[in-house]
Image (cartoon, rainbow, N blue to C red):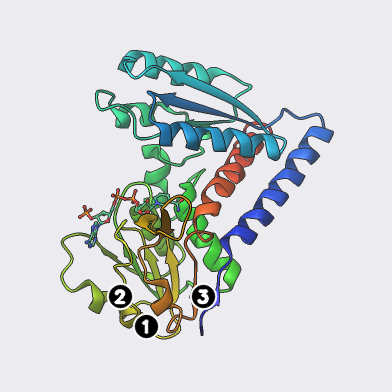
Amino acid sequence: MSAQLIDGKAIAQKVREEVAAQVAKRSAAGKRQPTLATVLVGDRPDSAAYVASKGKACAELGMGSISQHLPADATQEQVESLVRQLNADPKVSGILVQLPMPAHINEERVLALISIEKDVDGFSPLNIGRLAQKGREPLFVPCTPYGCIYLLEQAGVKIEGANAVVLGRSNIVGMPAALLLISRNATVTVCHSRTRDMAAVVRQADILIAAIGKTEMVRGDWIKPGAAVIDVGINSVPDATKKSGHRLVGDVNFEEAKEVAGFITPVPGGVGPMTIAMLMKNTLRAAEIQEP
Ligand code: NDP
């Protein structure tokens, strides 16, 4: 293996420790406990598990959490009224509405209602708009792309002036990742399902962020020698040697890419652990904005 492994688990743990230390410092100074409110609508088991793990992370770091659960048939008005109530509640530092919501709920309207000062997921149009504008600063950056950039910075990868390629243009990963790279002065190309000859584009990349959800689609011979590869993809493949019968792999063929890349994140243990760590960092930041 020639690439240096970027250990997301260890870097996420360091972020968590730093957040916990700041939380304790604020508490010793008599300040309000940073508190995350989660909103879950419906009964998707994966969403329920994500919300539970966020509550657990809050407890581990000395932060508070409030978990709000509405039934799958909740109305748009009920969801919006809950978000308004959380916006007005001074005990709540940050609000996270777990996506996806049931199909009859207009997610865009719900996200737009979250107060910009409590938008710890960074999905409100105000935060995304600020991220997209030159010279403007969002209050919060979406957690997964924030984690990707943080990993690059911690690994010492130079972003300024680099050719960066982002695979995927979703609202939650690809697009904000591209905007973040531009704001850090990279030259950015975004690929998606209509891109012609993606391999040729990827071969130009000094930095590659892959977020397409396609099992090991990026092959080793697509990677520019020495490139930094951040693999966001989480794909499940059958594996008879595992008790669960499956294992997780990324969008990049790790075994091939690690022989060519300069830096690479594993799956699991790369970007995955960063997402919740950055959510905790954002929740602390929300508390600091509301009560400096
Ligand atoms: P989406 O399905 O919302 O978006 C996928 C993007 O990839 C789209 O822009 C789509 O293009 C593009 N795409 C799909 N197929 C191809 C293809 N064959 N060639 C080129 N582009 C393609 O996914 P997400 O952004 O939500 O997630 C992406 C991956 O990241 C998933 O594996 C997901 O599990 C993982 N993930 C991991 C997180 C973590 O914490 N580590 C957090 C969030 C996601 P188009 O726009 O044209 O449809």
Can residue 201 be seen from the camera position used here? yes
Residue 233 quadrant: bottom left
Task: Please state the horizontal and vertical placement of residue 206, each as a whole percent of the image.
Answer: 40, 78
What's under tag 2, amino acid-wise? Val
Q: What element carries label 1?
A: loop
Q: Which of the marked residues, 1 or 3, is nearer the chain's N terminus?
A: 3
What's under tag 3, amino acid-wise? Lys
Task: Please state the horizontal and vertical placement of residue 108, each as a whole percent of the image.
Answer: 31, 32
Q: Is mark 1 within 8 Å of ligand 1?
A: no
Q: Residue at x 49, y 66 (%)?
A: 266
Query: Comparing marks 1 and 3, which lies closer to the viewer?
Result: 1
Give the Cα distance between marks 1 and 2.
8 Å
**Extreme residue toward the right, this view:** 28
Residue 35 quadrant: top right
What's under tag 1, amino acid-wise? Lys
Say which of 60 and 125 sits in front: 60
- Residue beneath disc 3: 158
In the rendered image, the vertical position of residue 80 relative to residue 272, given as above or below: above
Give the Cα distance between marks 3 and 2.
18 Å
Q: Is mark 2 on a helix, strand or loop?
A: helix
Q: Which residue is drawn at 55% across and 78% down?
A: 4
Other residues around mark 2 within 10 Å, as few (<14) / some (14–19) / many (≥20): many
Task: Please state the horizontal and vertical placement of residue 242, each as a whole percent of the image.
Answer: 47, 57
Q: Quadrant of the C terminus?
A: top right
- Residue beneath disc 1: 224
Q: Is mark 2 within 8 Å of ligand 1?
A: no
Position of 137 with respect to 28 (left or right) is left
Other residues around mark 3 within 10 Å, as few (<14) / some (14–19) / many (≥20): some
Q: Which image quadrant shows ligand 1?
A: bottom left
